Structure formats: C-alpha cells, structure tokens
Amino acid sequence: MTHEKALSALADPTRRTVFERLRSGPKSAGHLAQGLAVSRPAVSQHLKALREAGLVADEKRGRSRIYRIEHGGLEALRSYLDSFWGDVLDAYKEALEHDERDQNSD
C-alpha cells in the first residue's frame, strides 16, 4: 500500500487511537471499542479503513475477527518518513558549511 493511504487513514484521531491500541498485540473489534466514545460498528468501520490502507490485517477466529498491525504497511509509511531524514541532514550539513565559510571570511 502507499504511504498516502496510510497517512490519510491515520489522520482521523479515533482511527489513530484504534491503531495505537493494537501496539500491544492482536485484539477483537469489541476489545478495541472498549472505552471509546464510538460504537463497536463504528470501530469496525475504522478497522476497515485501516485494513484498506494496508496498516491492519485480520483473521477469523471462531465467530470473531482478530486484528493486528500489518508490518508491511507500516514499513512503507516508515520508509516514506525516513526519506525526509536525508534531506534534513543535507540541509544541516549545508548550513554548517555556510556558517564555517562565513566565520573563515571574517
């Protein structure tokens, strides 16, 4: 999945909370809905959006679906965010070199 879909899915605060609750391990939609100000069906819709963004996977266990973080989708998002570090480090290096040139020209 693309990082655009992942970023869009995580833009919603409730969806982000549901996703963050999966950090500690796989859970059912009912478990994820506990304590949230939204209904279980609403949580299921948020999980569907996370699944379509490639951030969550599910498997059927008996009559329940168990959701977990999909590490492949998370890796795509991480790669996108990590790509900014090269730009940041290059800009920092350039700023340091510029300051050094300014100091040497005094």
Image (tube, rainbow, N blue to C red):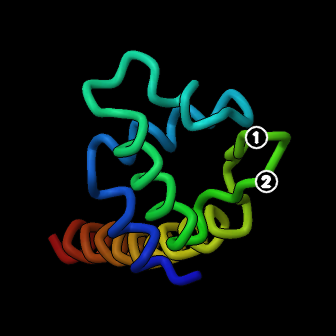
Q: Residue at x 42, y 35 (%)?
A: 40
What is the CA distance from the residue labelled 2 to the residue labelled 1?
Answer: 11 Å
Tell me the SS state at disc 2.
strand
Residue marked by disc 1: 63
Please name the residue shown 60% across and 70% down the image: 54
Nearer the observer, 52 or 69: 52
**Residue 98 sits above or below residue 25 on the image:** below
Q: Which residue is mark 2?
A: 59
Residue 80 point in image, percent of width and height: 51, 75
Residue 103: percent from left, percent from top: 23, 66
Residue 46 image offset from top left, x and y in percent: 41, 53
Residue farthest along the top direction in this orientation: 35
Q: Nearer the viewer, residue 22 or 29?
A: 29
Residue 44 left/right relative to 55: left
Q: Nearer the viewer, residue 50 or 76?
A: 50
Placement of 51 over or under 94, stated as above or below: above
Amino acid type for the residue under numbered disc 2? Glu
Left or right: residue 62 compared with residue 46: right
Q: Quadrant of residue 5?
A: bottom left
Kind of residue at disc 1:
Arg
Q: Residue at x 47, y 48 (%)?
A: 44
